[in-house]
Image (cartoon, rainbow, N blue to C red):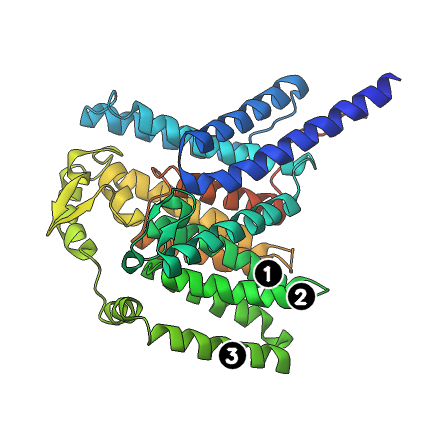
Amino acid sequence: MNMKNNIGVLILKSKTVNILFFLVIASLPFVNKFSKLIVVLFLIVFFKFIYENKDFILPKMHKLFLYSFFALIALSNILAGTMLQNIKLDLYLVIFILIYYATNYFIQKKILKLSTVVYAILISMTIYMLNGYFQYYVGYDLFFHHPFNATIGITSISQNRNLFAFAALFYFVVLLYLSFEKKEKSLWIYILLLASVILILLTFCRQIWLSMIIIVVIVGLFKYHNFSLKYFLLAVISIVIIALILFNIPELHHRLVALGEMQSSGRIEYWKLLIPHISETPIFGHSLQSPINNIALDGIYFDYVHNLTIEILYSLGMVGFFLYMVFIYYFLKILIKCKKKILKPYFLATFIALIFIQQQLGGSMLIHKFIGPSIMIFLALVTSYCSSEIFVKKREA
């Protein structure tokens, strides 16, 4: 009887974890109080599990990296005199990292399933995509109940085109994965895949356009032997539709021309202003939050650097840059050695697109409340499915 009760409790806990994780993914793009509450609840369940089971392991290299990273942040804050101002920012960073370890833990305990991630992205983003199209073609936001100006690009539930484009990129990757790997392929998958591409274009977010192109090229190099006449015809139809859209929407065409002319919406000017200040405190940096990170240039307001490499060099100095290189090396090594042949192309392509394109042109994974947790969840999937790192202690026989 006790054994049946234990199994029942375990199943209930497992369902709770998967439901919470589904809600974490579905709510993150809103970046509101509800999304924060769901993350906190997910982490509380994580702490409850590791307290009851006492089976969580932090690998030695992870310990060394984390000790070094947080020691650097503390030292940087002290030297810059920003310890008190940065408490909230540092707390968010701790939460981002906890999400990474909680996700790894639940996957390795075989509680959290990859299907939960896939369904969470598919269901939530399909709904958000429909709202985005309604915004653009009807001029009204169904979620926030107000008129919408389509000339700024689709924002849907994020109320920011760059953030929604970032969310749509993961949606695109999942649909790309299903279009190649799902045994029983449905026409709906190809329709949604094309719809996701058009959606990303209509956000007018050039950093995500480039990220999407990088993903297509890398996955294509892995999957070229799978191409058939059907794929070729679908690709031709898609290209024709996309071309018609590109040249019939003035705002979209303008953004495309701006991309070709390497216009950066003030980013390059901002970087030029920021880079000379790196030499002022080259070893430990100015700390993650500094007055210079909030400046106006030609009417464009920046609340972050829009380039992770420059941000780390400015905020955490050469020591931070060294840890950043260790971070990139660690995950690239995992991905290159990944034995999951089905997942490897999509993980590798997404990692390269995120770290070398999106993070060099957009919101930072260190400070942004949507981008940080999203990338941490993605990296946890990479670690759990592609590496031999152990986060759960094996039970003794």
Give the crowd class for mark 1: few <14, some 14-19, many >=20 residues within 10 Å.
some
Neighbourhood count class around disc 2 (C-alpha, 10 Å): few under 14, some 14–19, many 20 upward:
few
Amino acid at the residue labelled 3: Ile
**Sequence-wise, which precedes: disc 2 or disc 3?**
2
Q: In which quarter of the image is residue 134?
A: bottom left
Quarter occupied by residue 157: top left
Camera-side residue of 39 and 340: 39
Between circles 3 and 1, the one closer to the viewer is: 3
| Secondary element type, mark 3 | helix
Separation (CA) of disc 2 from disc 3: 17 Å
* Residue labelled with disc 1: 177
Q: For this view, does 397 lie left or right of residue 352?
A: right
Query: In the displayed image of the protein, which residue is found farthest to the left?
Result: 298
Q: Is mark 2 on a helix, strand or loop?
A: loop
> What residue would you read off at disc 3?
237
Q: Compared to 156, does 71 lie above or below?
A: above
Q: Residue 323, how many percent across, how many down?
A: 37, 41
Label 3 crowd (10 A; few <14 / some 14-19 / many >=20): few
Quadrant in which the N terminus is drawn: top right
Residues at marks 3 and 1 touching, judged by CB atoms closer than 8 Å: no
Query: In this orientation, which residue lies closer to the viewer: 338 or 36?
Result: 36
Residue at label 2? 186
The count of marks equals: 3
- Nearer-N-terminus badge (2/1): 1
Q: Is mark 1 on a helix, strand or loop?
A: helix
Residue at coordinates 64% horizontally, 36% vertically from top-left? 18
Q: Which of marks 3 and 1 is nearer the N terminus?
A: 1
**Amino acid on which disc 1 is placed:** Tyr
Residue 251, horizontal then vertical, whole percent: 27, 66
Q: How far apart are marks 2 and 1 (CA)?
A: 13 Å
Q: In which quarter of the image is the C terminus?
A: top right
Specify the amino acid type for callout 2: Ser
